[in-house]
Amino acid sequence: MSTREQDEPPAAMAVTPLSSGCAAAIDRAEHACFGISPFNSYFSVERIWQLAAWGFGRFADVHFFVPDAPSAFTFEALGYTPERAAWKARRQGQYTRNKILTALGDLGIPDTEGRVLGWAELEGNAAYARLYARGRRFYEGDEAFQAACRDTTSWVLAGKVPDGQEPGEEQVERAVEYFLAELPMFVDTAAVVGAGSSVFCYHQPPGFLRRLYGQELSWHPAPGQGFAVVEPLDPAPARWN
């Protein structure tokens, strides 16, 4: 049960745009999309509550991106069978979705289910499909872009393989599918949700995103698409017992 005080103000946030274009998208305040990683303990219900309270107080509309089904690619890269990997991704994805719904329900946000963008919502989205196909073409046809994607994937896998080991080429090739599934949300979330502009919010961007928003790669974010590093300045309070 929630123990939130109804008149408690939203948490203060440290908000760092990755470029001047990102800052402009934040100023427009039309839409924010929070990335919520299914297997990251950082995203407790309390933390999601903080992010949501700030987001709805700052932006006209808000969604939460949960890369649930694509997480299976990472588990396959770590040696799980496709069936076991899919099961783990599905179970954790539902658990993450439930945490988001709990936080939004506590805030009194309407249409909580419609605020979550998981694979079930995205696989039939025409804009997402178009962006994914374009990202795939860049990956297959541009060596520098491919290398940047693989470097990011290696960085992610390095934190999951046993200490002292480096991810192998086959592992990276399998796990990069997860990153390619995320890319459309970094490039043009606004198109996916039908907004004029959007800001993707996360607390720890890889170097790839700094290069992407710095227009150092061959694929650039859409006009009006921004990215912000968003972190609460205060610890997440204990609200649910």
Image (cartoon, grey):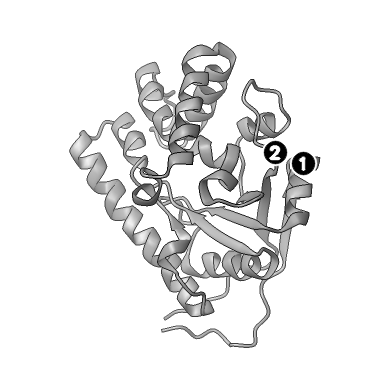
Residue 87 appears left or right of 74: left
Q: Please, is residue 8 above or below residue 220 in the view?
A: below
Q: Element type at marker 2?
A: loop
Disc on res. 223: 2
In this view, the mark in front (1 or 2): 2
Check the picture and name the quadrant holding the N terminus.
Answer: bottom left
Q: Position of residue 112 (x, y in %)?
A: 44, 69
Amino acid type of the residue that numbered disc 1 sits on in the rendered structure: Gly
Disc on res. 21: 1
Q: Position of residue 71 (x, y in %)?
A: 36, 41
Q: Position of residue 215 (x, y in %)?
A: 71, 27
Cβ atoms at labels 1 and 2 below 8 Å apart? yes
At x 53%, y 29%, the residue is 152
Distance CA(mark 1)–CA(mark 2): 8 Å
Residue neighbourhood size for the residue with mark 1, other residues' Cα within 10 Å, grouped as few (<14), some (14–19), many (≥20): some
Q: Nearer the viewer, residue 241 or 131?
A: 131
Residue 92 appears left or right of 49: left
Check the picture and name the quadrant holding the C terminus.
Answer: bottom left
Amino acid type of the residue that numbered disc 2 sits on in the rendered structure: Pro
At x 57%, y 19%, the residue is 145
Mark earlier in primary sequence (1, 2): 1
Q: Position of residue 226 (x, y in %)?
A: 68, 44
Residue 22 appears left or right of 92: right
Q: Nearer the viewer, residue 219 or 176?
A: 219
The number of callouts visible is 2
Res 239 seen here: no
**Image quarter of residue 85:** top left
Q: Please, is residue 64 above or below residue 107 in the view?
A: above
